[in-house]
Amino acid sequence: NQLLVDGTTITGLIDLDSAGAGDRLDDLACLLAHLSVLAHTTDRHRASRINAVGKQYLAAFERATDPRDLRYRVAAVVVSLAPGPHRVQHPHWPETTVRLVDLAERWLEAARRARRR
């Protein structure tokens, strides 16, 4: 409900719930984190498609930002999303929350391995 579309093409994204001035790196990290979490909370077919899109975005964002800082910020957003399954009382929220914390740790490890720009 926050996508602008023209037929089957996404032409824009609206995220007004916390609109305001901010750091572009945080916005890019937020998008990557949401895609990453969504891929871990959906079926395998959708997850592979979401992960493929996320990899494309990550590659593009790395050309314009510091890859290490980007990944650290993605990890922080993933941590902030980890309580979501409990908030909505997802039937398997304990396991899902642990998987999301593990996901954040993988982003942290990727940040440690990434080269600074």
Image (cartoon, rainbow, N blue to C red):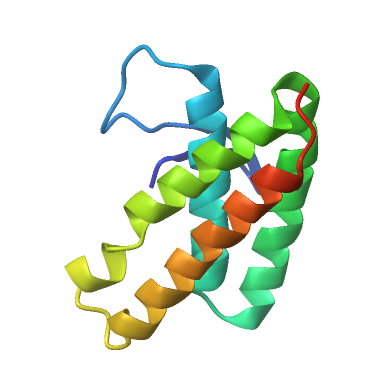
Residue 4 seen by the camera? no
Hey, which quadrant is residue 89 in on the image? Answer: bottom left
- The residue furthest top is 21
x and y, in percent, of residue 104 in the image: 51, 58
Q: Is residue 96 left or right of residue 112?
A: left
Locate the C terminus by quadrant. top right
- Please name the residue shown 47% across and 17% down the image: 23
- Please name the residue shown 76% across and 31% down the image: 62
- Please name the residue shown 22% across and 72% down the image: 86
Q: Is residue 46 left or right of residue 42?
A: right
- The residue furthest front is 112
Hey, which quadrant is residue 57 in on the image? Answer: top right
Q: Is residue 117 left or right of residue 107?
A: right
Residue 70 seen by the camera? yes
x and y, in percent, of residue 82 in the image: 35, 62
Q: Is residue 68 left or right of residue 14?
A: right
Please state which of residues 87 and 50 is positioned toward the viewer in this rendering: 87
x and y, in percent, of residue 85 in the image: 29, 71
How many numbered marks have been drawn onto this rendered protein structure?
A: 0
Hey, which quadrant is residue 20 in on the image? Answer: top left
Residue 64's place in the image compared with 38, above or below, is above
Please state which of residues 105 and 20 is positioned toward the viewer in this rendering: 105
x and y, in percent, of residue 44 in the image: 64, 81
- Please name the residue shown 44% across and 53% down the image: 78
Residue 50's place in the image compared with 46, above or below, is above
